Amino acid sequence: MAELKMINRTKYDTANAIIGMGEQSGGIKIAYDKYTYTAAPSDADTLLGPKLPKGARVLDVILKGTTGGGTGDYDFGWAATLDEDGATLAADPNGLIDNLDTSAGAAIKQMVDDVNLAGQFIKFGQETQTYLTFVAGPTTATGTVEVAIVYVVD
Ligand SMILES: [Ca+2]
Ligand SMILES: [Ca+2]
C-alpha cells in the first residue's frame, strides 16, 4: 500500500515550488453568450461563441437551446489554438459539448453529461475561439441558444 501525491500536492511539500493560482486559490470565471435566430440555421452552420483568454482552464460548459421542432443537433467546441505547453491544438468542434438534441423540445446539456469530453479540464495556451456547430439545424424559424463556460485562469 502506498500513499501517492498529485502534482500540486507534491509541490506543496517542495521548497520554492509554486502552485499556479488557478490550481490552488482560483477564482471561477464565467463566459456567457446568447444567440437569437429569426431564420432556421442550416445544417453545418457555425456560430461563434465567447473567446476564452490565454491560460483559461475549462471546468464546465452548459449549453441550452429552444426546441428545434423535429430537428436539432448541436455541438460546441473550439477553433484551432495552442495547448497549455504551447503546442498546436487542432480544432475540436465537439470538444466541449457533444450532441445537444433539441429535436423533441427545448434542451439543456452540461459538460459532465458526456463521458470523457476532450475539453474537460483543458487549458488553452492562447486566446481561444469557441463555436457551436448546427450539425443538424433546427426546423423552427425562431429560437435561441445560450452557453455558459465556467473556467479558471491563472
Ligand atoms: Ca471531438
Ligand atoms: Ca456531435
Image: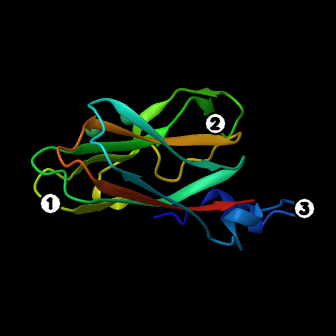
Amino acid carrying mark 2 in the image: Asp
- Chain-order first, disc 2 or disc 1: 2
Q: Is residue 15 above or below residue 86?
A: below
- Check the image and name the residue furthest to the right: 16
Q: Are marks 3 and 1 in contact (CB under 8 Å)?
A: no
Q: Residues within 10 Å of mark 2 (few under 14, many from 20)?
A: some
Work out which quarter of the rendered image holds the N terminus and state it: bottom left
Task: For marks 3 and 1, give the CA distance.
Answer: 54 Å
Residue 83 has which mark?
2
In the rendered structure, the answer to whether residue 60 lies left or right of residue 65 reads: right
Residue beneath label 3, please?
A: 16
Q: Is residue 121 above or below residue 90?
A: below
- Give how far across and how far down residue 94 sits, in percent: 37, 39
Q: Residues within 10 Å of mark 3 (few under 14, many from 20)?
A: few
Residue beneath label 1, please?
A: 105
2 or 3: mark nearer the eye: 2
Residue located 71% across and 74% down the image: 25
- Give how far across and how far down residue 3 sits, in percent: 54, 66
Label 1 beta carbon less than 8 Å to ligand 2: no
Of helix, strand and loop, which one carries label 1?
A: loop
Residue located 45% across and 33% down the image: 92
In the rendered structure, the answer to whether residue 22 lies left or right of residue 136 reads: right
3 or 1: mark nearer the eye: 1
Amino acid carrying mark 1 in the image: Gly
Which image quarter: residue 9? bottom right
